[in-house]
Image: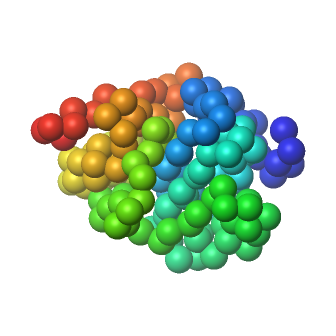
Amino acid sequence: MQNKTLSPRLAAIVEALPLRPGLRVLEIGCGPGAAARAVVSRIGDGHVLAIDRSAKAIQQARNASKEEIASGRLSLRQVAVEDFELEVGENPYDIAFAIRVGALDGRHPELAKRARQRIAAALTPDGRLFIDGGNPLQEILLNKETD
């Protein structure tokens, strides 16, 4: 893997994602962007949007991801998952993944329903959501009508 800053845990998570060239991937809670950069390297001409509620994390990701951003294959946005919406004209995503995101892993249950609704609205009809906590990932099934 070209990203030398990827921890073994993050490497296992990225490896477990069902990635293929051309996918649009949403990373929720990207932190400094290491996983997002690793995903970019695996999806050919696809695109990754990495979001985080922290301005500091987005700035760290921006500083570390200049090449991927310049290539047009990585975008960053400062927004909390429970407030996330596609921008006008933005295509939906095929896969979303989140690592240590409290609104999805049970630490902030009051945000969970709204976060799942926002994610479901941002995914294609066949879109899939993965979070950490499995071996190494678990898929969260989204009911696009009621979630």
Q: Residue furthest front?
A: 89
- Name which residue lies at 28% across and 48% down: 121
**Rendered image coloring scheme:** rainbow
Q: Nearer the viewer, residue 48 or 109?
A: 48
- Name which residue lies at 29% across and 43% down: 120
Q: Is residue 32 left or right of residue 55?
A: right
Residue 140 position, x and y percent, is 36, 31
From what the image shows, is residue 28 above or below residue 21?
below
Question: Quick one: quadrant of the C terminus?
Answer: top left
Question: Quick one: quadrant of the N terminus?
Answer: top right
How many numbered circles does the render carry? 0
Q: Residue furthest top?
A: 135
Q: Nearer the viewer, residue 127 or 21?
A: 21
The image quarter containing residue 31 is bottom right
The image quarter containing residue 83 is bottom left
Q: Is residue 72 left or right of residue 53?
A: right
**Residue 136 appears in the figure:** no
Residue 22 position, x and y percent, is 61, 39
From what the image shows, is residue 35 above or below residue 83?
above
- Name which residue lies at 79% across and 64% down: 67
Residue 28 position, x and y percent, is 47, 53
Q: Is residue 87 left or right of residue 96?
A: left
From what the image shows, is residue 114 above or below residue 120?
below
Residue 5 position, x and y percent, is 81, 51
**Residue 120 appears in the figure:** yes
- Name which residue lies at 63% across and 31% down: 20
Q: Is residue 50 left or right of residue 8?
A: left
